[in-house]
Image: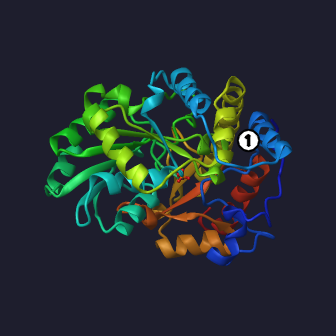
Amino acid sequence: MNFDENIDRRGTHCSKWDMMEPLYGLSSDDALPMWVADMDFRPPAAVQQALERMLRHGIYGYFGDEAAYREAICWWMANRHGWQLDPATIFTTHGLVNGTALCVDTWTEPGDVVALMTPVYHAFARVVRGGGREVRELPLVQQDGRYRMDFDSWDERMTGREKMLILCSPHNPGGRVWTLEELRGVADFAARHNLILVSDEIHHDLVFPGQRHIPMTIAAPEAAERLVMMTASTKTFNIAGAHIGNVIISDEKLRNAFARRHQALGISPNSFGMHMVTAAYSPEGAEWVDDLVRYLDGNRKAFDAGIAAIPGLRSMPLEATYLAWVDGSGAGLSSEEFITRVEKEARIATNHGQTFGLGGDGFLRFNFACSRAMIDEAVSRLQAAFSDLQ
Ligand SMILES: Cc1ncc(COP(=O)(O)O)c(C=O)c1O
């Protein structure tokens, strides 16, 4: 796989490139899209071949018999994450934002509160609030430049109205791979406050060398009666348009409750996604992911070195994900000025920190899952835009 290839995605109805003009006022003729979390890479050949088989056959009816699909998921989790799971505990949803919304709908009522460790992936708060629930923000603290959990202060913030906690593991946007101790702390916190614990592990395959992701179900098996696991192949293999994800629930009571909502809302699988995921979760897919992570690691290093050369800017050291979380506050610029320089001078579209909740203001999130040439271009544009600070 040649990750260096620049593939022109413009004019393909892709959000990342084609929505830059309407959302940021930046033309894709010369601006760089480093915002929404998908990659500028083609998926493994096995995925393309699965789609080609469908195209050649040419009939696109309802999907049937999920056995191979479920087996592929179980194979992947066992081989890549040391997690043995029962195929009967898997629900297929239309992605994990949909999975999150279904969890909120199943275990909370309008007016209830859902706790989030902020700053965190913005869609969590969007679906919680969209469903008429409130968000309790539990701010992560920075220690040695990385996010840490602060259970004592979080205990004080809780009011008794919270019904659910959504964990992002690995963490978007801070790039943390939570340790066993931290994960066990989360499970204890959820037990102390009697919360359903939803663990979104969509970034679990995109972990840099030297780090090891631990699935929450392995870290805290005693939390099973309150635990809902969410995983997906879509970030890993860059197939987010397939809109497919897994909600995995080992506890029977929780599983029955979720099954009722899943059925009530008429959710059934999209055959394209099913074929793509089955093909991706394979030895060939695994080899591709290993290559991908090596390439992303190179991008991460090149991008971080470029940012480190700009006085006052700092990229949080990432342990996972392809999303650099850059703090501009040390440059003495307001968040508006920081955004203006990046968007108007460097002509780069990023995600704005304040959309990630408490603690996000002053940061910008840069997606570096693109060719190395684009990273080099982004770095030189940023260095020029902040040259007065050099
Ligand atoms: C933590 C997290 N969950 C979910 C999603 C999106 O999931 P989906 O595309 O399956 O709805 C993202 C996308 O960036 C994410 O970072």
Q: Position of residue 52 (x, y in %)?
A: 82, 42
Q: Position of residue 6 (x, y in %)?
A: 83, 51
Residue ID at (43%, 61%): 356
Q: Nearer the viewer, residue 53 or 292?
A: 53
Query: Left of 308 or right of it: where is 218?
Result: left
Tell me: residue 39, above or below residue 201. Answer: below
Residue ID at (51%, 37%): 319
Image quadrant holding the N terminus, namely: top right
Q: Nearer the viewer, residue 183 or 58?
A: 58
Q: Does residue 296 show up?
A: no
Q: Does residue 278 show up?
A: yes
Tell me: residue 192, above or below residue 224. Answer: below
Image quadrant holding the C terminus, namely: bottom right
Q: Quadrant of residue 387?
A: bottom right
Q: Position of residue 309 (x, y in %)?
A: 62, 52
Query: Left of 183 or right of it: where is 11?
Result: right
Q: Quadrant of residue 362?
A: bottom left
Q: Nearer the viewer, residue 327 or 270?
A: 270
Q: Which residue is mark 1?
A: 43
Query: Left of 181 or right of it: where is 171?
Result: right
Tell me: residue 48, above or below residue 360. Answer: above
Tell me: residue 3, above or below residue 262. Answer: above
Residue ID at (16%, 41%): 192
At mark 1, the secondary structure is loop
Q: Nearer the viewer, residue 259 or 278?
A: 259
Q: Position of residue 36 (x, y in %)?
A: 60, 59
Question: For the residue marked with disc 1, what is the amino acid?
Answer: Pro
- Local crowd size for mark 1, using a 10 Å CA cut-off: few (<14), some (14–19), many (≥20): many
Residue ID at (22%, 44%): 151
